[in-house]
Image (spheres, coloured by chain):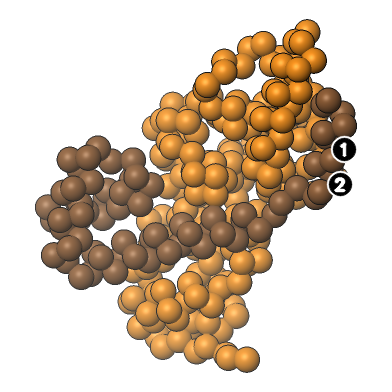
Chain colours: A orange, B brown
Amino acid sequence: MAEPAAQTAFAEEALTHLDTLYRGALRLTHDPDQAQDLVQEAYLRALRYQHSYQAGTNMKAWLFAIMRNLFWDRFKGVRKEDVSLDDVGEFVLYDKLRDEGARPESDVLDKIAASEVVAAVDTLPPLHREVVLLVDVEGFSYKDAAETLGVPIGTVMSRLHRARQQLQKSLYDYAVESGIVRPSGMRQVPQQ
Amino acid sequence: MRCEECSDKLDRFVDRELSDTEALQVQLHLEGCPECMDHYDFESHLKRLVKHSCECDKAPEAFREKLRQILS
């Protein structure tokens, strides 16, 4: 067991990454209570295994790896089937919107609510969702994301690519359903 | 650089994952190609939108305090 002062310092540093872990857990579990349970368990495990953490390395990535491994331990029964992600083809939202006469940024992106973006992220399968969380939300490099997830960089890139395709498809579907764009041509933007 | 090659590298350019040389090549192409620059602006905007939307969630203060107690 570490000296009390060392343990306190370790805990304080670890807690600076709490928002990242909580956000990740919330996006993985979709439930604030489960997210808190998962994060608390991850911190207790981190404290127990703090000797395996190398000072000066990426503590955020190390903690995230502990948290997501706990998540997968709990849900490992669904891991295999969870990997699948419907093939949406090469869906490029930018091209799609341009083809339909919309100005992609000002007509569409600026009008999509944050809650809809989060909902689109939440519909991604967890293995794809966690790559988006690490790279797009938390700013991990492909290398750090690969180490955190225990997969090759190529897997990070392919999951990220497919996740983004799916995400763009979801946002496009939302934009059509909500009347932000009309699939046949010009956009229609209801304003408050 | 052709537009196709630029498009292939756009994700990694947005994610700052290209080598310095490759990033410079893409940057030079973007500066001379308004269409690819528009596409780049869109992809960057989308990445920021995902980040800002998901970053709204913060750990509740009571939970932070509870953890601090448990870990100390």
Quadrant of residue B19 within the rendered picture: top left
Residue A83: x and y in percent read 58, 38
User: Vertical placement of B28 versus A147: above or below?
Assistant: below
Label 2 marks which chain's residue? B
Which residue lies under the disc numbered 1?
A: B66
Q: Quadrant of the N terminus of chain A?
A: top right
Residue B33 has which mark? Answer: none
Label 1 marks which chain's residue? B
- What is the secondary structure assignment of the residue under circle 2? helix
Relative to A56, B4 lies left or right:
left
User: Which is more toward the observer, A99 or A50?
Assistant: A50
Residue B62 has which mark? Answer: 2
What residue do we see at 30% from left, 52% from top?
B10
Quadrant of residue A126 within the rendered picture: top right
The answer to whether marks 2 and 1 sit on the same chain is yes
Residue A99: x and y in percent read 33, 76
Residue B4: x and y in percent read 20, 55
What residue do we see at 71% from left, 24% from top?
A9
Residue A8: x and y in percent read 76, 23
Amino acid type, label 1: Lys
Amino acid type, label 2: Ala
- What is the secondary structure assignment of the residue under circle 1? helix
